Amino acid sequence: NARQSIADWIFRAKAPESPPVTLVQRRIFILPTKQGYLFGLVLLVLLLASINYALSLGFLLTFLLAAMGGVAMLHTWRNLAHLKLRPGRCDAVFAGDTAQFRVVLESPSRERYAVAIRRRDGDPVFADVRPAEHAIATLAVPAIRRGRLRCGRLEIFTRYPVGLFHAWSYFDFGLSAIVYPRPATDAGLPPQQTLAGDDEGIPVPGDEDFAFLRPYHAGDAPKLIAWKALARGDDLLTKEFQATASAELWLDWIDAHAPDAEARLCVLAHWVIETERLGQSYGLRLPGVSIPRGRRGAHRRAWLE
């Protein structure tokens, strides 16, 4: 809306900012809240009534309340003054999940109460900050689609101690999180391909050879249940079979049969997770790029990105 656009222009901050950010005096703004304006109106009515009727006690009450309001404004401003802010960890998520953006708050001296951080039009996250310690405010943001999700500019504010004043400041660390494609769980296992015939085979789930018995899970097919073991008085068990796949596997864009590019990425994401779970060495081929094969750790993040 127009009000928010004007506020963005007036209170704009350079982005991204280099951490840590210290909320010095010139960065903090303060205005009365709705309750603060009502409090001011009440003071005005008391003052006019005291003048009209020459009430000494009325003047005393009016100036006492005005002094308390001034002290409340000072404490509201001090609750943010010299607070230090640092960016926290932002882990990658899959599309449809919730990204967690973290901001670390540090107080060099006194304790701070009810300090809140929020995104534009988002719900605030509150934290208390103890001196010489740090608190972490975590903002949950829905990751609707794949790509880079940017947190954007954040507002830090407080209305402590009595809610008559709203003190706030803006900061922007350029926080972002990678959103992976949503794995297509119905895509099954990737096709087994080999580029080196002398590679040693490794076991993968299949239907060729019996491997072992495992505890029964709800939904297992009746034909896989070890009925003989059950007849002997053992617990309900399920038979697992395996096949032998090549030690080298390539996940190829061409093999991911899907109606569009987004669906293909979802299939490939599922294949990466499943192949990683099996501990198999694999590589990834996309149009215009080929990522060498590897196993686990940083390679998995590179492939999903």
Image (spheres, rainbow, N blue to C red):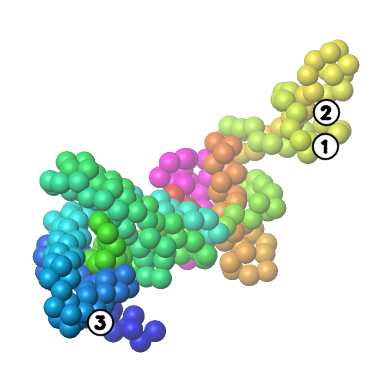
Q: Position of residue 147 (x, y in %)?
A: 46, 64
Name the quadrant of the C terminus: bottom left
Q: Position of residue 37 (x, y in %)?
A: 27, 75
Of residues 112 and 188, the one nearer the viewer is 112
Q: Residue 48 sits in which quadrant? A: bottom left
Measure how far apart labels 3 and 2 are at the Cα level: 67 Å
Name the quadrant of the N terminus: bottom left
> Which residue is label 1 attached to?
221
The mark found on residue 225 in the picture is 2
Q: Residue 248 sits in which quadrant? A: top right
Neighbor class of circle 1 (other Cα within 10 Å; few <14, some 14-19, many 20+) is: few
Question: What residue type is disc 2 on?
Answer: Ile
Q: Position of residue 168 (x, y in %)?
A: 24, 66
Q: Residue at x 35, y 63 (%)?
A: 118
Measure how far apart labels 1 and 3 are at the Cα level: 62 Å
> Which residue is label 3 attached to?
9
Of residues 271 and 155, the one nearer the viewer is 155
Mark closer to the chain start, 3 or 2: 3
Give the residues drawn in magenta, as a range: 280-300
Pointers 2 and 1 in contact (CB under 8 A)? yes
